[in-house]
Amino acid sequence: MVLSGDRLKAKDLWRDAGYDPFKQRNLPNAFAKVKDAKSAIRFVERYGFLGYASLKSGLDADDQRWQEDEEDLLPWILGQADTVRFALDIIGMLEHGTLRELRNTLKSRQVSLTESEITEQLQKLPIVGWGAEGPPNVTFRYNCTIGLETLDHYYSAWKTRGRFMTWDEDRVRSHAAELLTALVNRNTAHVRPVFFCEGNDRLQMTYDYRALIEVIWHHIGNMAMMSQEGTGVRIGVCHECGSLFVASRRPREGHPEFCPPEMYEGKGSRCGLRHRMRERRERMKRKGK
């Protein structure tokens, strides 16, 4: 793996023949930990390229691997990882958070519009249906990475009126859910089910996709549904880093739970190890006093 300028490049990146990213349902948890070049390289070496080249060329992921070089753009990877963290925060706040915490999560990512930008956006909206209250509120936006681009996206801010911090709980939760829906849908544009025959008469289903980042967003959509339905699958929150993950079992009573181990890491959790090491250092420090 080579970092050339702001691009990650590699030839013949090794991949386990049995590796299926759709079976790695905690890919969002692993990708959310990407915050710099070092962690980006580590993720790509373990799970594969995110698919910048595939999205740009229009080739499906399998076809892109036959090209001479694969590459990912580092700023794009970091932008996608940041947007994934935002999406996981929304899921967490919708399930566990208070109204104030959910508001603050959204508010922390909002960017105010200038007067000229407000005018420009209002001109794009139909006048019919505004009613006596006047035009919708378009005084803020969210900066997110969608597909190949990091842009300011307005989403359902167009559809609401009044100052954001005065919205009631139903309004805030609805806005958060619409924003999350838009992020998932627009980042999974090329994911589709594909059916095939196994043996003579057994019909099986898999998924086709253009880029690994789309699979990650597919899992985020599944996590959002798991968190609101009685599926028997639980969304856990790491005691060490605060990230969400799909929990395989309930933690023992009185014991904190941590992010699951990443692929090829065995049974140990990095966050759990970090937590235990810090507690050990603190105990040794107290004894030293």
Image (cartoon, helix red, strand yellow):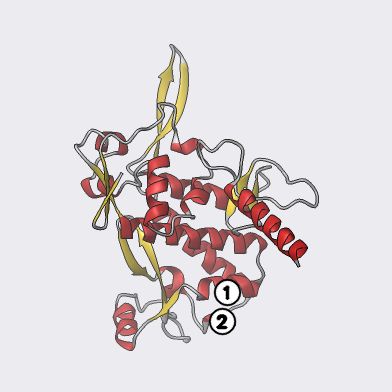
Disc 1/disc 2 C-alpha distance (Å)? 7 Å
User: Which residue is located at x 37 percent, y 82 percent?
Assistant: 113
Q: Quadrant of the N terminus?
A: top left
Q: Residue furthest right?
A: 253
Q: Quadrant of the C terminus?
A: bottom right
Can you say whether 150 is above or below 277 in the image? Answer: below
Q: Is there any visible trace of residue 182 in the rendered image?
A: no
Q: Residue furthest top?
A: 200
Task: Compare residues 224 and 81 and report the one nearer the observer.
Answer: 81
Can you say whether 54 is above or below 200 in the image? Answer: below
Q: Is residue 268 left or right of residue 251?
A: left
Q: Is there any visible trace of residue 121 in the rendered image?
A: yes
Task: Compare residues 258 and 56 and report the one nearer the observer.
Answer: 258
Asked where in the image residue 75 lies, by quadrant, the reply is bottom left
User: Which residue is located at x 50 percent, y 74 percent?
Assistant: 108
Q: Position of residue 67 (x, y in %)?
A: 20, 36
Report helix, strand or loop for mark 1. Answer: helix
User: Which residue is located at x 45 percent, y 75 percent?
Assistant: 110
**Label 2 near label 1: C-beta < 8 Å?**
yes
- The residue indicated by pointer 2 is 165
- The residue indicated by pointer 1 is 103
Amino acid at the residue labelled 1:
Arg
Q: Which mark is residue 247?
A: none
Amino acid at the residue labelled 2:
Met
Q: Residues within 10 Å of mark 2 (few under 14, many from 20)?
A: few
